[in-house]
Amino acid sequence: MNKKLAILFLLMTVVIDAMGIGLIMPVTPDLIRELLEAELSEAAVWGGILSASFAVMQFLFGAAIGNLSDRYGRRPVLLLSLLVMAVDYVIMGLTQSIWILLLGRLIGGVASATQSTAAAYMADISTPEEKPSNFGLLGAAFGIGFVLGPMMGGLLSEFGSRAPFYAAAALATANLIFGYFILPETVTDKIRRPLEWRRMNPFRALQYIGSLPGLGLLLIVYFIHQIAFFVYPTTWAYYTQEKFAWTAWDVGISLSCFGIGMAVVQGGVIRMIVPRLGEWRTMIFGMTIATISYAFFAGATHGWMIYALMPITCLGMVNNPALQSVTSKAVSDNEQGELQGVMTGVAAIASIMSPLMMTGLFGYFTAENAPIYLPAAPYYFAGVLEAAALGVLLLAYARHLKTLPA
């Protein structure tokens, strides 16, 4: 097996996943308005419905896809997901109906299992020592896709609201062909697990994974952390425009810089921190930095401060690869797919809840009749959530220390 080519395919898969989302973001409002012949306010409501439907399907099918990859292998699940993604983008690009667009997002939520299966594949081919840095590479790949997607989507929008969908389909197809020729299977008969239908139920799978020693508290940490983190993609544009009068161009540039910072930290800095601190202390360090970052972000009084704080904010993201590594080591080789599916489901729940909470807070504290004017309210709230997650993490760490030999 050519491990380097396999890793390259996994990274390209995650980049394309992130790019696919970012590519269509700039044109989705225009496409919805075109389909509905409606104003922006109505389009925004439908945009929320499309986003929520995508996340709901991620939650409902994440564990099922993970279990299927534990039984039938990572390769067929990854390749089939890419095929479905490619066809789905074409359908959404051709549609003349808002209901077909909604169906496309529902199908896309199921096909987004490529990320969790890619993480399971990465766990399969990584030694315990390699897991933090290799999971960091996946995070870096997502950051790169997060940068490239909106930029390309904005450029392609010059050719119409459908062009980015076709570009996303082409990228998925190209990666499918690449993977078909170079990607070997990692699930052998030694670790292949019989399919248990009850564990394909997302609630049952979550209950089972959460019952494993040391994982219950870590899933709680991950869930709270994800709710806090989603404050960035859901309120960044609104907050910076309200507080600093940023234009759409300013917002786009700042988000691109943020994505670059994510890629540098999770692709490179993580490799320097984990060997020195270890995985558990890296998680604690990252969540401490993240808690402080939310407070600083909320307290910024000038736009340039956001850029000055960005390296610190991105540094806090070292906790994600470390957490993925610790959880991956806590399950057997034949449960890696199920674990990653459950974590995808947990993140999906957070991505449903967080936008409602964060935008609701922003709207309440910027309204004319607000008790106090506080556009930074979502970031203060995110800081409180991150502090709570840190507290749970410290409790989990204390329990972990008790399990170590004296």
Image (spheres, rainbow, N blue to C red):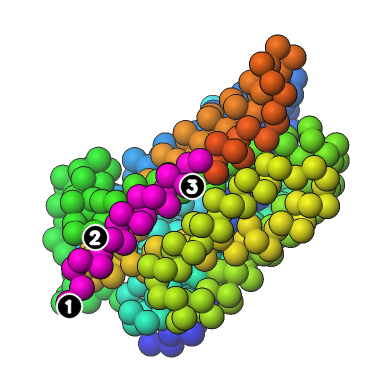
Residue topped by disc 3? 386
Q: Is residue 166 above or below residue 34?
A: below
Q: Position of residue 273 (x, y in %)?
A: 51, 76
The answer, for residue 295, to whether it is visible in the render is yes
Compare marks 1 and 3 and give the one earlier in the sequence.
Answer: 3
Q: Is residue 397 magenta?
A: yes
Amino acid type at image mark 2: Arg
Q: Is residue 31 magenta?
A: no
Task: Report if the CB atoms under discs 1 and 3 are less than 8 Å apart.
Answer: no
Q: Secondary structure at mark 3?
A: helix
The residue nearer to you, when weighing 299 against 111, is 299
Q: Nearer the viewer, mark 1 or mark 2?
A: 1
Residue topped by disc 1? 406
Q: Position of residue 395 (x, y in %)?
A: 31, 54
Residue topped by disc 2? 399
Mark 2, other Cα within 10 Å: few <14 / some 14–19 / many ≥20:
some
- 132 relative position to 381: left or right: left
The residue segment tinted magenta is 384-406
Mark 1 vs mark 3, CA separation in Å: 32 Å
Amino acid type at image mark 1: Ala
Residue at (29% x, 51% y) in the render? 217
Q: Residue 95 is drawn in which quadrant?
A: top right
Q: Quadrant of the C terminus?
A: bottom left
Q: Is residue 333 above or below residue 194?
A: below
Q: Disc number at residue 33?
A: none
Amino acid type at image mark 3: Glu
Q: Secondary structure at mark 2?
A: helix
The residue nearer to you, when weighing 131 against 182, is 131
